[in-house]
Image: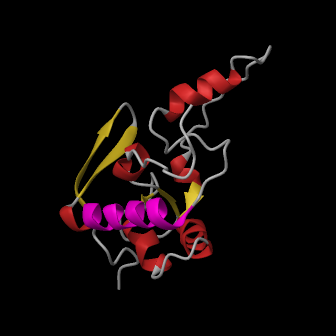
Amino acid sequence: MSAQLIENYRFKYKTRGKWIYVPNDRCLQRAKHIIRFFNRDVSFPDYFYHYRSGGHVAALHAHLKNDFFFKIDVRNFFYSIARNRVARAFAAKGLRGAPTYAKWSTWPAPGLDDTQLGESSLPLELHRAQIPDRRVPSL
């Protein structure tokens, strides 16, 4: 029996040394459900800018008053997040069916084929999704 029971992408391709997974329609439906859940039921702290409309610009403005900046790029950041960690985070926020949604929300890590478990990555669509947070005002 295969470890990756859920096929959550239409196809994958490699560009600049990284695998890109193109989610299938069922995966996109589940991604929209997760986004609706977080929009409706989860509040983020004031310092969390990512899912706000204009959040990246607001984060920049919040840091402009600082004298020093530290820029890092964590190599393979999303691949360093294990599927079970995604499931625990979903469950901690109250998402029913968290382990299943975590399976739909992650890809196999580089170097593993689609039947092996291991570190996973959030799908591109979830990473890019704009989730307006109505509870935290935009700057």
Give the magenta part as a residue range: 27-42
Q: Locate the C terminus by quadrant.
A: top right
Q: In this view, does 113 lie above or below 76?
A: below
The answer to whether one can see residue 8 in this image is no
Residue sitting at x 43%, y 47%: 132
In front here: 91 or 39? 39
Q: Locate the N terminus by quadrant.
A: bottom left
Q: Position of residue 10 (x, y in %)?
A: 20, 58
Q: Position of residue 61 (x, y in %)?
A: 62, 22
* Outermost residue toward the bottom in this view: 1
Q: Main secondary structure of the magenta part?
A: helix
How has the structure been colored for display? secondary structure
Residue sitting at x 60%, y 23%: 60
Q: Position of residue 17 (x, y in %)?
A: 40, 35
Residue sitting at x 34%, y 62%: 31
In front here: 60 or 84? 60
Locate residue 20 relative to residue 89 in the image: left or right: left
In front here: 131 or 102? 131
**Residue 14, picture quadrant:** top left
**Residue 27, picture quadrant:** bottom left
Locate residue 76 relative to residue 64 in the image: left or right: left
Q: Is residue 10 above or below residue 65?
A: below
How many marks are shown on the rendered structure?
0
Q: Within the magenta stretch, is there residue 36?
A: yes
In front here: 116 or 138? 138
The answer to whether one can see residue 35 in this image is yes
Locate residue 22 relative to residue 47 in the image: left or right: left
Q: Within the magenta stretch, is there residue 56?
A: no
Q: Is residue 112 above or below residue 99?
A: above
